[in-house]
Every structure is written in structure tokens, then in C-alpha cells.
Amino acid sequence: MDRRIERSRQMIMQAFIGLLEEQDFEKITIQGIADRANVNRGTVYLHFTDKYDLLEQSVETYLMMLVDSCLQEEGVATELSREQLIRAFTYLKEHASIYRVLMTNKGIPTFRHRMTQFIKGNITVVVNYMNLETGIHRDVMAQFLSISVTGLIEWWIVESMPYTPEEMVEQMTKILEARLQLWST
Amino acid sequence: MDRRIERSRQMIMQAFIGLLEEQDFEKITIQGIADRANVNRGTVYLHFTDKYDLLEQSVETYLMMLVDSCLQEEGVATELSREQLIRAFTYLKEHASIYRVLMTNKGIPTFRHRMTQFIKGNITVVVNYMNLETGIHRDVMAQFLSISVTGLIEWWIVESMPYTPEEMVEQMTKILEARLQLWST
DNA sequence: CTGCTTTTGTTGAGAAATGAACAACGAAAG
DNA sequence: CTTTCGTTGTTCATTTCTCAACAAAAGCAG
């Protein structure tokens, strides 16, 4: 694949997220995005049909890159390993400026939702291993925990990563284990 | 002018300076530069004849950009104004990672020399206004002061800019005035 | 020295990006 | 309402960049 394509896409999406931090989505113009990306206005239309498509593709792409950051190699274990989680947190830390906007911008709830869904999928695996106390449904439990994890990650990024990825993974693991033991028979 | 030209040049020079920080000039390859700049190897040859030309042009370009940062608009006063100096220090602060390498890398003394020459030119104007004590030649005085200023700037950048541009300009002005009064009749 | 690998510098065909133009649309101001 | 202005989305000729290939030179191990 021609490297110019991926490079242009990256520059445009990066500029777009940057603008999203400064002004409202509706106030953003294609010309503004092109200027910030240091790209011709026509080039934006070469890769995205319009603003809304750019938003969708950005959410999709950055979510995929986050998922890839922990899924690369390592076989297809059902449960996410400690190393994979650390890689994900490290990746988030390196691209914190992007993901802070994606997670906190109130005009873009899509990313938070999609990310929570992904986390839920992985937490469900863990939840299914446990024998829960009668009365607590597994899907409710998984939903509750995944929202919690999303919130924790958001807090970590907004607070400029006050702990190392290793510390965060350790803390998170401990909390999850404690919760699951608390509500299991 | 086609924006791709300037963009490619910038990406390549930036990658080059970055590599210069990590390895010796002679160990750097064109392929390595191209990789880091995310550019085809052929593109490097499109703008620079070889490694050495790239080095020369980088020194020249970054020196010019530093000079431009304080010379833009403001008419052609003989003496650099406080505002111009603050702009220059602010510019240096914003591109500290580049200029730290350019000033400290021992394989590239050219940049330091050229920068000192530029400073000397401006300090000479100030020195010529003063009535120096007999026995101190103006050119020696100018040389002495310009080297001092260069060293001060290097220290400021290497120490990660411990003072604001405004503070630095104020300090520098005071020192220069004190020196000049000390040695004038 | 000899073979082996890496790097260099160049080429050409094809792909992508550019600048400049255009009509169409919506918003704001008179 | 009309005019102005900025934005949109599209077009096209031109320029730059890419990729792959190449021969030649340089670096290096045995």
C-alpha cells in the first residue's frame, strides 16, 4: 500500500481530533482541518466523503489501533494477559492527547460506547468463570464492571497518567479480583 | 510553491536531527532517515544530494528559521528589541529538541559557529555605541560577549529552559549592560 | 584477498497530492 | 428580499512522491 495514503489519513485525523479539542464539531470546517494537517483541501475529500465520515472513520481507526496494541501476536488466548494490558496502557500513554479528546469530548459519545463494548467482551470471559451469588445476572455484572474500567482509564488519562501502566494494570487486576470474590459464592 | 516540497524537506530534516541525537553522523544511513521520516528513500535524494548536503542544508535552514523568528516585521531597527529577543527565545523553547542537538552535538560545530557569528553582528552594534576604556578593542569585546551569549543560550536549552523567555531576556540584558558599563569610561 | 551483504545513487512507470478553478448552497448583513 | 461572503464538493492538468528495480560502491567476515 502506498505510504502516502496512510500518512495523509493520519495527518488529517490527527488534525481533526486536535481541532475537536478547541472548538465544537459543527464549527469545524474542512478547510480548517486541511490547514492544520498541512494538506490540500482536496486531499481530505480524497479520503473522506465529509466531516461526518471523517468522525466515524477516526473513531473506528483509533479504536482499532487501541485494540491492536494489546492483541498483536501472543496467540489467541481467551483472557487478556498482563503483558497485553500493559501494552495497551503504554500505548494509551503515548497517544494520550488523542484519546483524552476521544474519551471526554461530549459531542462524540460513540468512542466511549465502542470502547466499553470491547472491554465488556473481555470481562465477560472472566465473569463467566466465576460462580456468582444468586440474584446477580452475569450480563449486569459484566456491564457494571466494564463501565467501571472505562471510567478508570478515562480518569487516568485526564489526570495525565499519575501512575505507570504497570501500576495501573496491577491496581485494576486487584480491584476486579476483589469484586468478583466479594460477589461469588 | 507546492506544499509537498516544504513538508518533505521538514520531515526529512527533522528525522535527521532526531537520528543525530541517537547515533554518530557517520553511522546514519539514508534509509534510516527515510524510515524515520516516513518517506521513500528516493524522496531524500529528490531534495538532498547526500548526507553531507542534508547536514549543511539543515544547519542553514534551522539557523535561518531562528533568525527569522526575531526578524519578522518590526521594521529594520539597528538594535534588536526586547520583543524580538523574547520571540527568539520563545521559538527556541518550542523547538528545543531540535536546537539542543544542533548546539551540543560535537560532530556539528558549524551551527554553533554560525549562530555566534549572527549574535556577534548584533552585539557589535551595541558595543559601537559605548566608549570603551582604552586598551580594550571593540572586536575582542564583541567576540567575548557573543560567545558568552551563545553559551548562556545553550545552557538554558540543555537545562530544559528553567526560566521563561521573558526572564532570560531580562537577565541577559542586565548582564550585558553591567559589563559594558564596567569597561566603559 | 574473496565472497557476501549493505548501502548508495539513479531510473521509469504509475499513483497520489497539489493548486486553481468551478457551481451550488447556506448564513449573515444590509 | 437581495447581496455578500464563506463553505462545500467536484473537476482537471501538473507536480511530487512512491515503489521496484538496477548497477556500482562500500563495508565486513572468513
Image (spheres, coloured by chain):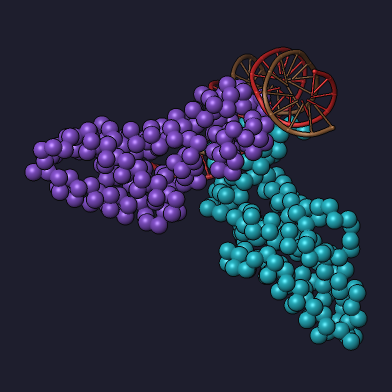
Chain colours: A purple, B cyan, C brown, D red
Of residues A50 and C12, the one nearer the viewer is A50
Of residues A99 and B183, the one nearer the viewer is A99
Left or right of residue A169: residue A136: left
Left or right of residue A105: residue A142: left
Where residue B33 sits, quadrant-wise, is: top right
Q: Eyeballing the image, is A26 above or below B90?
A: above
Where residue B111 sits, quadrant-wise, is: bottom right
Q: Residue at x 90, y 73 (%)?
A: B128
Of residues B35 and A46, the one nearer the viewer is A46
Q: Position of residue A20 (x, y in %)?
A: 56, 39
Q: Residue at x 16, y 38 (%)?
A: A136
Q: Residue at x 84, y 52 (%)?
A: B73
Left or right of residue A115: residue B118: right
Q: Eyeballing the image, is B158 above or below A55?
A: below
Of residues A52 and C16, the one nearer the viewer is A52
* Quadrant for the N terminus of chain B in the image: top right
Q: Does the image show residue A34?
A: no
Q: Position of residue B83 (x, y in %)?
A: 78, 62
**Number of disc labels:** 0
Q: Residue at x 32, y 41 (%)?
A: A147
Q: Position of residue D23 (x, y in %)?
A: 61, 25
Q: Position of residue B182 (x, y in %)?
A: 81, 85
Where residue B123 sits, quadrant-wise, is: bottom right
Q: Does the image show residue B133?
A: yes
* Quadrant for the C terminus of chain B in the image: bottom right
